[in-house]
Image (cartoon, helix red, strand yellow):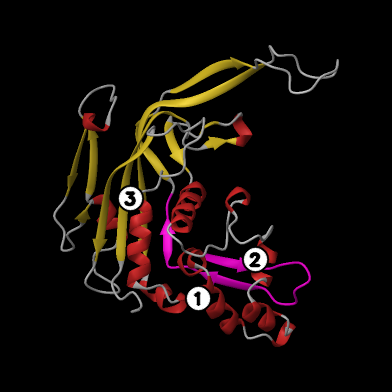
Amino acid sequence: MAILQNKIDFAAIISVTRANINGDPLNGNRPREDYDGYGIFSDVAIKRKLRNRLQDIGERIFVQSDDRSDDGNKSLKDRADSCTEFKAEINKGKKADKDKCAQIACREWFDVRAFGQVFAFKGDDVSIGIRGPVSVQQAISVSPIDIVDMQITKSVNSEAGKDSKASDTMGMKHYVNFGVYIIRGSINCQLAEKTGFTDEDAEKLKKALCTLFENDASSARPEGSCEVCRVYWWKHAEKTPKETSAMIQRSLHITAKTDIPRSFGDYETTVDTTECVPEII
């Protein structure tokens, strides 16, 4: 497998209809928004979904959700210790070869060689920081979002007794009525050489991006409420092209055709001509 030799920039346009794509736990789990009313889909949440999709297609993932653990490990330390070769090198303490540890981790887990990882656990005498070649930005909505707050009630008691909450306990549910968000990111060749990120890995990442919301349904995100409408994939001819990521990302324009967009069809999408022509999926 050849190490990535061509820098890649990418963008994904996603639509959200009556769903909470990324709730803020510090704000009653309301959909995230900035002070101007534009919706936010955090980079951490995006990478979580990418990891889940990569895990679904059979890749080994280091940072797994507890409810999706497929190796029986209950913590990141347990997962790191389960790799015999990695554990043996770490046990050398201050004499451990950090570069060798990083190579083992990158070879073992897809998300480590893609996004990087910090290995610093209690009881270990050495910590290792790995910078990954794949960077993902926060996704911001194209237009200000309209958040709907809906009051709900419980229909049954969870527990019996006078201290239990009654069946008419009130609660709140929040969702974005409609919004279009843009995910932007890039893959750096210089860092890919250090982690061993390959062209094949890039294709798998693209597949995960195109199917971001598969196997992701919940009461907050009903099936079909979040959709990847279009993916732009710029694969440059060089490791360090003269067209920067900022220039490439500025070439993508999305404008609303109506005052109140209600679907992806209410937006017009254009791409300026650049030396690197994107693959549009």
Q: In the image shown, does 181 or 112 lie closer to the viewer?
A: 112
Identify residue type, mark 1: Arg
Q: Which residues are magenta?
A: 116-137
Q: Secondary structure at mark 2?
A: helix
Query: Where 136 falls versus 83 (above or below)?
Result: above
Residue occupying the point 38% across, 54% down: 208
Comes first in the chain, label 2 or label 1: 2
Question: Going from the N terminus, do you reach mark 1 or mark 3 first?
Answer: 1
Mark 2: give few (<14), some (14-19) or many (20+) Cα within 10 Å. some
What type is the residue that disc 2 sits on? Answer: Arg
Q: Nearer the viewer, residue 24 or 214?
A: 214
In the displayed image of the protein, which residue is found farthest to the bottom? Answer: 95
Q: CA distance from mark 1 to mark 3?
A: 24 Å
Residue 79 - label: 2
Name the disc covering residue 107, or none. Answer: 1
**Few, some or many C-alpha atoms within 10 Å of disc 3 (few <14, some 14-19, many ≥20)?**
many
Image coordinates of residue 229 in percent, x first then y, are: 28, 41
Category of crowding for the residue at label 1, using alpha-carbon neighbours closer than 10 angstroms: few (below 14), some (14–19), many (at least 20): some
Disc 3 target residue: 210
At a point 43% along the width and 29% down the height, the residue shown is 37
